[in-house]
Amino acid sequence: MEHQELWKSVLGQIELSISKANFVTWFQGTAIVSVEDGTAIISVPNGFAKEWLENKYNHTIIQALRGFDETIRSIRCIISGPQPIKKSFDAVVQPGSQATMKPDVQSQQRTNSNTQTTRPAGGFIQTAPKQATAMFHESNLNPRYTFADYIVAENNELANAACVAVSRNLGQIYNPLFIYGGVGLGKTHLLQALGNEVKREHPEKNIKYITSERFTSELVDSIKNQRTDKFKEYYQQMDLLIIDDVQFLSGREKTQNEFFHIFNALYQINKQIVISSDRPPKAIPTLEDRLRSRFEGGMITDISQPNEETRLAILRKKVTEKGISIEEDALRFIAENITQNIREIEGALNRVIAYSEFYKTAPSISLVEKVLSQLIIQNKKNIQTKDIVAAVEKLYSVSEEDLLKKGRKKGISNARQVAMYLMRTELNMPFSSIGDFFGGRDHTTALHAFEKVSGEIEKNLRLKGELSTLKNELYQSNGA
Amino acid sequence: MKVTCTQENLSKALSFLERATGKQTALPILSNFLIRVEKGKLKLSSTNLEIGVTTYVNAKIEGAGEIAAPVKIISNFVGNLPSGEVVVIDVQGSAISLESGGYDMRVRGLDPKDFPIIPEKKGETSFHLPAQALKSALQRILPCVSMNESRLELTGVNMLFLDDEVHIAATDSFRLAEQVLRLPDGASGEGYDLFRSQNSSLILPHITMQELARIISPETETVAVTFEENQVFFDIDGVSVVSRIINGKYPDYKQILPKEFAYAAKLSREELLRAVRMAGVFASQMSGEMLVSVSPDSGEVLVAARSSEVGENRTVIHGEISGGEPVQILFNPRYVIDGLNAISTDSVYFLLNSPSSPAGFRMIGSDGVIDQDYLYIAMPIRK
């Protein structure tokens, strides 16, 4: 058993035998580092836990350990050292030029303060929120994501163009920029790339990338410590604020409220806000109207599922990145069969690479088929005949009744054949059942339909396109 | 177990212990301290699992034993006793009674077996730090420590160990203080070099450093530092403090310390502090800013604040100022007040570059020499 698994099981047992407070106090942050000569080495976060585990809980722990590993006779604790936490610090933010301040305001300000003006209040102290500049500022950006690495295709070209434009004119054009699209389609990549680009071009800008989840927990912390003013202060000094997965704010009224104020504060002084979500603002439930209308006030753009060529391009790029060679056929197979999202494609590719390394064989199409068969079946098993019928009905504008009826009207029989083909390829149904399904037709009819469509796919580009649309429709509606 | 000691000794020991107790209610034992008779001595200890404090109190001992006692109640009782009295602590089972003159109290203690075991150092002391210099350094540094737990590394004090200097710094990213602590000859021996080879820098929790500053008395000469198993032990006049280290990487703050300043104003600390405090009253609640205008030609510094809610205020102070054209800069008064409060000399050096770069404060000794070992910098409010 792996150490991690072992320790998890041990903790599970110990948790039952001691009080919750004790468990949390003494066992939080512990792990088994190694097992040597019957001694389990346990890493603990501090000296107190070390003493306590070694002196008070040693019997409990050894007993629990022996339940899984008979050879363990003793334990020893080590205090885990300071591991540099992997965080990217921006080089210190040097306060930049006063780009946002118009010259006339500046001169007016000078006169005001020098001549003890009699103007109404607000003369030299502007009311727009301004804060001391932070010396060290953490943007949360992962430098791995750049625009150069982002594959632009028709499914995301508008979103990409908007991001590039925003990176060149912060707060000037599309503000806020709202990007939505399903899981694993590249929203985060695009957002991070935007942040990285701005950071590269304008290192003095304050940039923050944060998920709405993290935003909420920071807010909760600040409420707990009574530092909400600090929290707001911090966010209001951003030049570019990127909030990822904003749909998680749904239903959190207090967070929405704070976010609303931060949003307004930034928006009013032309600071850029970029937001992503898995659905358009209208479709996020329990989002306060005032927030929704603000999101809708800027630019909204979506990222949709990549088509087959894009998927293939992504695969090629990944393969080059990893420096391995895979047959074009094999790549094509992956691109054809893994249609859901880019993360899945990456996963499938990694799986193929792992297998080929393991078996020491070149990743050929047969290997790929074997390796991915399980993944593909998983994808397919959720689809039912009625989904296929529904998709075909929608695409060819025919009714279910027409499809199941006898009749050889050209449009309908084509649609029917496509439906039969899909039932065979996607559901692996026997021809006889397909025949039965379509109003008790003979199995040879189904076989004929299958052969006809298979034969035509390569020659008939339109049919090929239609099939790919149908497949997308099937898996997309299933995945959502 | 029965022990007899003086009120002063007990009260002093309890004041060290009180800070190192846990506030969390999940583990009630942490709001207790451990009374123990060990090798004929009275040993008191407390911990909040971040730091642990152990001290010995001179006492007359009868019998042996140990008990966990509620620290707040006992330290309040002992603190209110008239000084010069003798306190008798009597422990029978779980009952603790304290008696002194006509005052007495009774309280129930907890099972000492539940009290956390405080780690003890096993090896030799790594090196010694000059106590008084460390204490004044900490007092100047601690106001800058960040309380925001979202950046854990900033909630500690950073110590950078160089050849014969220790650079102590803290920042909350809006202001920063750094003090150079010069090690006396002989302090940086073999132990120090060994220690440095393992840790070129350490981040120590705020509470640990506060506790050190509190324990160092005017008579303390050195603080012994030992590093073992990723924890640090301090020994100060018989009081031992063990502390965890904050994991993380301290920002490379040296980068932003300005190498030189274009403007330098020699001012009375008192006058400047008064002006800034006044400005703080008038600064707007919302932006909380004050304007500092420095005019080298006329040798004047104007501190002004104005808000629509309150009104306005201006103070002009005079000093020797070098630099070019008059310059104006906006500050949060609080950051300037903290910096001036940390300064112990009568005159300060107020240093500036531009309205958008950090401003510095240095101390000027009574002999007119600028103290180059301490620097406080505050970020301006940027437009």
Image (tube, coloured by chain):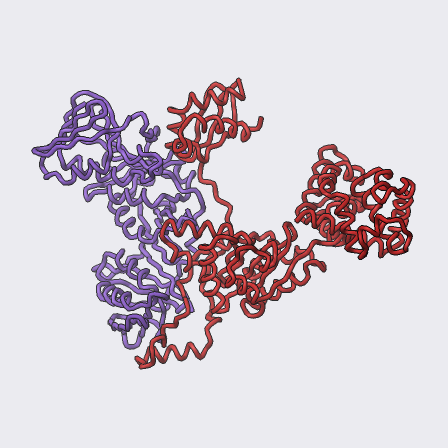
Chain colours: A red, B purple
Quadrant where the image shows the N terminus of chain A = top right
Identify which residue, B50 or B217, lies in the foreground: B50
Numbered-mark total: 0
Query: Is residue B16 or residue A477 the one in the foreground?
Result: A477
User: Residue placed at 53% from the left, 58% from the top?
Assistant: A242
Q: Nearer the viewer, residue B229 or A260?
A: A260
Residue A441: where, in percent of width, then height? 89, 43
Q: Residue at x 38, y 24 (%)?
A: A56
Identify the image quadrant of residue A355.
top right
Relative horizontal placement of residue B53, taking residue A399 as reference (left or right)? left
Image x and y of residue A222, in percent: 40, 52
Residue A350 shown left or right of residue B35 in the figure: right
Rendered view: B356 above or below A35: below
Which residue does the image show at 36% across and 52% down from the upper left? A226
Residue A204 visible in the current orientation: no
> Vertical placement of A25 versus A128: above or below?
above
Asked if one can make out residue B147 in the rendered structure from this viewpoint, the answer is yes
Q: Is residue A446 left or right of residue B45?
A: right
The percent coordinates of residue B203 (x first, y second) are 39, 44
Q: Please provide percent x and percent y for residue A89.
A: 49, 53
Q: Is residue B72 above or below residue A106?
A: above
Furthest-left residue in view?
A: B102
